Amino acid sequence: MTEKLTFSMQTVFQLNKIEKTCFGKEAWTVNNLVAEFNNEFSHLFGERVDGEIVGYACVRVMYEEAQICNVAVLPEFRRRGIATGLLNSIAELAKEQGCERCELEVNTANLPTVELYKKCGYEIAGTRPNFYRRSKRFPTRDAYTMIKKL
């Protein structure tokens, strides 16, 4: 079950492990994660299995928009509905906060994730050329901007 995460260094270290596993060199650092917990606009959600966080998402809620920053699930826990649960929790929070939409960027070559977002009600609104740094993970640096109207 998805839960709203509260700050502790143990939680930060668990999220950092997920970041490194899922994003490699592009992972957020411990300092980045601490900053998100300290940002009044940021909210972090997680999914635990046997007490350990196996997936998490970060969203910044400002005015009419909820900007999804990160969604990450450890590879061995994917395709179990965890990311969908995290995205649903974000949408619920965004509605409660009076947002009109959720928005995110995703690499255009990350087709499984693009399909996940579509399944959760997101639509491609545009493309941002060269949005990402060069990476060995994907052959392109372009991103889709995807939006879910609430």
Image (cartoon, helix red, strand yellow):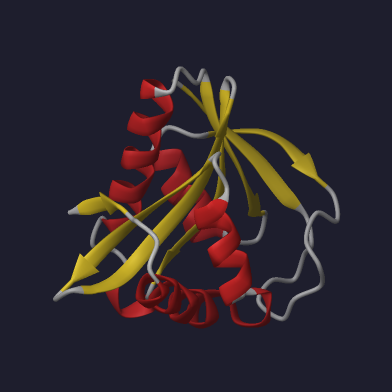
Residue 78 seen in render? yes
Q: Is residue 16 above or below residue 104?
A: below
Identify the image quadrant of the C terminus: top left
Q: Is residue 37 left or right of residue 131?
A: left
| Residue 68 figure quarter | top right
Q: Nearer the viewer, residue 22 or 27?
A: 27
> In the image, residue 35 lies at what x, y percent?
60, 59
Residue 70 seen in render? no
Q: Is residue 44 above or below residue 77?
A: above
Q: Residue at x 37, y 75 (%)?
A: 74
Q: Is residue 125 above or below residue 96?
A: below
Which residue is situated farthest in the right direction here? 130
Q: Is residue 92 left or right of residue 114?
A: left
| Residue 24 figure quarter | bottom right
> In the image, residue 72 lies at what x, y percent?
45, 64
Q: Nearer the viewer, residue 70 or 42?
A: 42
Q: Residue at x 66, y 77 (%)?
A: 137
> In the image, residue 57 lies at what x, y percent?
44, 55
Q: Is residue 83 left or right of residue 139?
A: left
How many numbered marks, from 0 up? 0
Q: Nearer the viewer, residue 27 or 30?
A: 30
Q: Residue at x 27, y 61 (%)?
A: 47
> In the image, residue 145 lies at what x, y percent?
67, 40
Q: Is residue 64 above or below residue 137?
A: above
Identify the image quadrant of the N terminus: bottom left
